[in-house]
Image: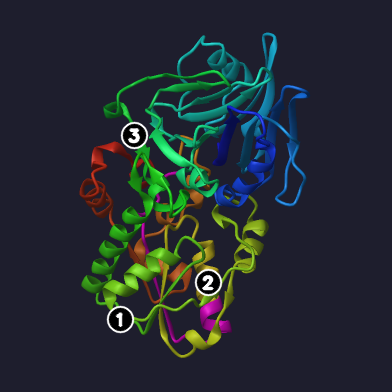
Amino acid sequence: MGVAGMIGIISFHDGWNVGELLKYAIPVLKHRGGGDTWAAVFSRSSGLTTLLMREDDKAPSGEAGLLCIGTNNEFRGVVKCGTIDVAYCLDGVVVRPMDVCRLINGEVKALPYTSLIALTSNGELVAHRPVWLRNLVLGAYGFDLAMISNESSAIGALGGEVRTFVKPGSTIRINRLKLSISEGHSNSDAKLCAMEFIYLSRLDSEVDGHPVYEFRRALARRLARRLVDKGVDVDVVIGMPETGIIYGLKVAEELRKPFEYALISIERHRSALRKDLLERLSSVHLKLSPVISTVRGKRVLLVDDSLLTGLSVKETSQVLRHRAGSNEVHVAIASPKVVRSCPYGIDMPPDDELLANTFNDEDAQKVLEVDSLTWVGLEDLYSVADELGIGKDNLCTHCFRR
């Protein structure tokens, strides 16, 4: 299982070097877990080429391309499907290469819980969105390029415009001559992953037309109300880099407390997606450099988007107390308690490593070495979904429910 950032681009006219364009999507997509950046490029002169790519590399020329950034290499590959080669990228549950072929060849109409973008050796771009959880968006740059990604912000970053959010269960096929969409189930059958709104998607993205920013702002308001009800009083609010920043800003607004950029990222990656304990520890320290003057001698509220093992929060509380000299450290989490790992393709630690599944609030507070611990409730999440027109019944909240 894992999370992948992916985008496919195809040109309808000569003169476009799609391979070069792919490089500009790297910084927009690498937040989805990091890892190697893998690309496939097609040109009529040299066929299908695959390579590992960095932002400063010279990209191969081509008329169509696929970029995949994932937490491991099981989510990408090249498979022989009859007479054609197919380079593919997956987001969700790993499927077998033969299942990719069956979808490409039209033998099956769906992959379970898994989005796919593929590029064939005859220059066709193929994308599939499953009925549940994953999302895809189709965009264009004028009449010259078609783009497909699981992040709408990636299309905007390349100068394109979002044309439609792909319906659940649909498969899209694009070549230089035509675009066809085989539509699947109605949206009423679909579930959207709550973590896409809380944590995974970029702040400037939309999921099925619902702005991620608005969702996080609304969650932050409810988190602030819980802090007020609990009587938590602080001098300053800070956010965990990077995805905790927006929550911290909005909580500070609601509480009418100053917000400070007190934690500076040195290297951006998501420690929760690192599998090895030592690697997670080094990841936390690499992304935490305190601005001591902003928190010394103060009661600090640290806001983060979610809490899984608690490792990042514990390390941060120690940094704030022992390196930066904070008097108190209070923690607020802008998601409900994660009590089960995800069976549908989101990398999470096993159940016995999830803090909220192991400790009650009082013990968790002691483990984290913080003065208070406040969570958003599941009912808050449902209220936000209803308020923003998503509908609470359309969110998958498996990881929040025992």
Disc 3 secondary structure class: strand
Mark 3 lies on residue: 191
Q: CA distance from mark 1 to mark 2?
A: 19 Å
Q: Position of residue 372 (x, y in %)?
A: 36, 73
In this rendered view, identify the residue nearer to me: 31 or 368. Answer: 31
Q: Quadrant of the N terminus?
A: top right
Residue 235 pos. (x, y %) = 36, 85
Mark 3 vs mark 1, foreground winner is 3
Identity of the residue furthest to the bottom in this view: 297
Segment tinted magenta in the rendering: 319-341
Mark carried by residue 316: 2
If you read the primary sequence from the N terminus, does the residue marked by circle 2 or circle 3 appear first?
3
Question: Disc 3 versus disc 1: distance between alpha carbons?
Answer: 38 Å
Please, what secondary structure does the residue beneath circle 2 have? helix
Q: Earlier in the sequence, mark 1 or mark 2?
A: 1
Quadrant, the C terminus = top left
Q: Amino acid at mark 1?
A: Asp
Q: Are marks 2 and 3 in contact (CB under 8 Å)?
A: no
**Percent position of residue 256, x then y:** 28, 79
The residue drawn where x is 49% and y is 88% is 296
* Residue 317 higher or lower than 356, as above or below: below
* Position of residue 266 in the picture relative to residue 293 (left or right): right
- Going by the numbered disc 2, the residue's amino acid type is Thr
Q: Residues within 10 Å of mark 2 (few under 14, many from 20)?
A: many
- Give the vertical position of 347 relative to 304 (above or below): above
Residue depicted at x 53% and y 48%: 349
Which amino acid, mark 3?
Lys
Read off the residue under disc 1.
233
> Badge 1, how many Cα within 10 Å: few under 14, some, many 20+?
some
